[in-house]
């Protein structure tokens, strides 16, 4: 596979050819994906190509693809395709996320590919290894932990080798790894500690419910979906900010496995901010987050999170 230069200095036609060439590889996102990113984030094709290559390397997705290739004639081709789609989904989400985050976008535009890879590759690898500590189903049966275990059980039942089954099951959880790595770096907490608070915050505010609903049930109108995509990034920014508030509330990272203290920590923060949290929960209940998704519902939900953050910070 041909690789883009380190700087975003090549032409739009060259960038489009990059995505066309990429579509013949094991883990890919084609030209229509690149066009959606350009439309949603406002960057050019060259920048999308750089972000694509950065994410591919940071998550070492080619190694994952090679593991699947080694199963030729050992598992059905359709199962191999399903496994590869997990990597493609992660690749798409993280390219969107990287180019929606101003710091990451500036880093890739100003400093090139190597700087972004250097910033994230080692911490993301550490985060992947820490997933069992962040989402331990035997101690903390959270929604995300249950989903991880269900995915792993599914791949095992289909005949996927155990190590690959766990890796494939963990890919959807890695969607949040950039945020968690950044939180750990800026607060001095460990990846498991910051990650546990991040996921607990999502559960507390039902952010996961709204996000998953939007992903599972896209809207009919194209520009409504573009708006929801942008609002998902806005929602992620609020989740990062509120997670940081809870970490600052805690001070030093508690000792011991996160599963033993994270719910207690979040409960203490919720008790201190009880009035603001109840106001938020009242509105969230009226929005019926399990019901149909709409741009208006998203807008109001984000506004109420802003009010909660402002109240908690004061």
Image (tube, grey):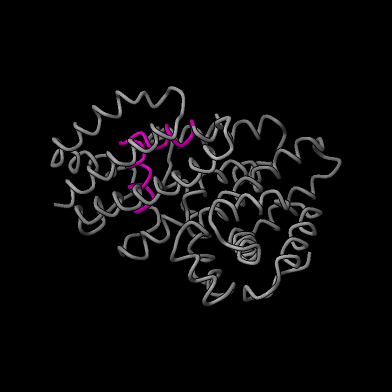
Residue 153 as seen in the image, left or right of residue 227: right
Q: How many marks?
A: 0
Please tell me which residue is depicted at 44% across the width and 44% down the height of the picture: 231
Please tell me which residue is depicted at 19% across the width and 39% down the height of the picture: 270
Dominant SS of magenta comes to helix
> What is the x, y in percent for residue 43?
57, 61
The boundaries of the magenta stretch are 194-213
Q: Nearer the viewer, residue 106 or 135?
A: 106
Eyeballing the image, is 9 above or below 45? below
Please tell me which residue is depicted at 81% across the width and 35% down the height of the picture: 76
> What is the x, y in percent for residue 79?
75, 36
Residue 293 as seen in the image, left or right of residue 5: left
Residue 122 as seen in the image, left or right of residue 308: right
Q: Nearer the viewer, residue 42 or 304?
A: 42
Please tell me which residue is depicted at 53% across the width and 55% down the height of the picture: 41
Residue 182 as seen in the image, left or right of residue 59: left
Q: Nearer the viewer, residue 103 or 57?
A: 103
Magenta span has 160? no
Q: Quadrant of residue 168?
A: top right
Q: Give the quarter of the figure containing the N terminus.
A: bottom right
Eyeballing the image, is 245 above or below 165? below
Q: Quadrant of residue 260?
A: top left
Eyeballing the image, is 88 above or below 153? below
Q: Quadrant of residue 291?
A: top left
> What is the x, y in percent for residue 266?
24, 42
> What is the x, y in percent for residue 210?
42, 33
């Amino acid at each position: 596979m041909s690789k883009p230069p380190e700087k975003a200095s090549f032409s739009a036609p060259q960038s489009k050819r990059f995505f066309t060439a990429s579509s013949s590889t094991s883990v890919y996102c084609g030209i229509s994906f690149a066009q959606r990113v350009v439309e949603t984030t406002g960057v050019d094709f060259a920048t999308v190509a750089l972000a694509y290559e950065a994410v591919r390397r940071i998550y070492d997705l080619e190694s994952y693809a090679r593991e699947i290739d080694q199963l030729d004639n050992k598992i059905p081709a359709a199962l191999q395709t399903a496994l590869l789609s997990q990597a493609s989904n992660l690749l798409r989400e993280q390219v969107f996320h990287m180019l929606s985050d101003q710091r990451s976008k500036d880093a890739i535009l100003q400093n090139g590919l190597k700087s972004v890879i250097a910033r994230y590759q080692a911490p993301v690898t550490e985060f992947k290894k820490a997933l069992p500590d962040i989402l331990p189903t035997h101690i903390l049966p959270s929604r995300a932990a249950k989903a991880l275990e269900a995915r792993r059980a599914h791949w095992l039942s289909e005949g996927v080798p155990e190590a690959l089954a766990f890796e494939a099951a963990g890919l959807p959880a890695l969607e949040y790894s950039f945020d968690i790595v950044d939180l750990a770096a800026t607060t001095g907490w460990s990846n498991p500690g910051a990650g546990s608070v991040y996921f607990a915050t999502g559960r507390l505010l039902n952010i996961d419910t709204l996000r998953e609903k939007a992903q599972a049930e896209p809207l009919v109108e194209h520009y409504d979906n573009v708006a929801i995509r942008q609002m998902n990034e806005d929602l992620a920014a609020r989740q990062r900010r509120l997670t940081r508030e809870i970490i600052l509330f805690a001070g030093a990272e508690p000792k011991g496995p996160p599963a033993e203290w994270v719910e207690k920590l979040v409960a203490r923060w919720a008790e201190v901010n009880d009035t603001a949290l109840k106001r938020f929960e009242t509105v969230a209940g009226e929005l019926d987050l399990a019901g149909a998704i709409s741009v208006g519902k998203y807008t109001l939900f984000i506004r109420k999170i802003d009010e909660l953050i402002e109240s908690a910070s004061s």
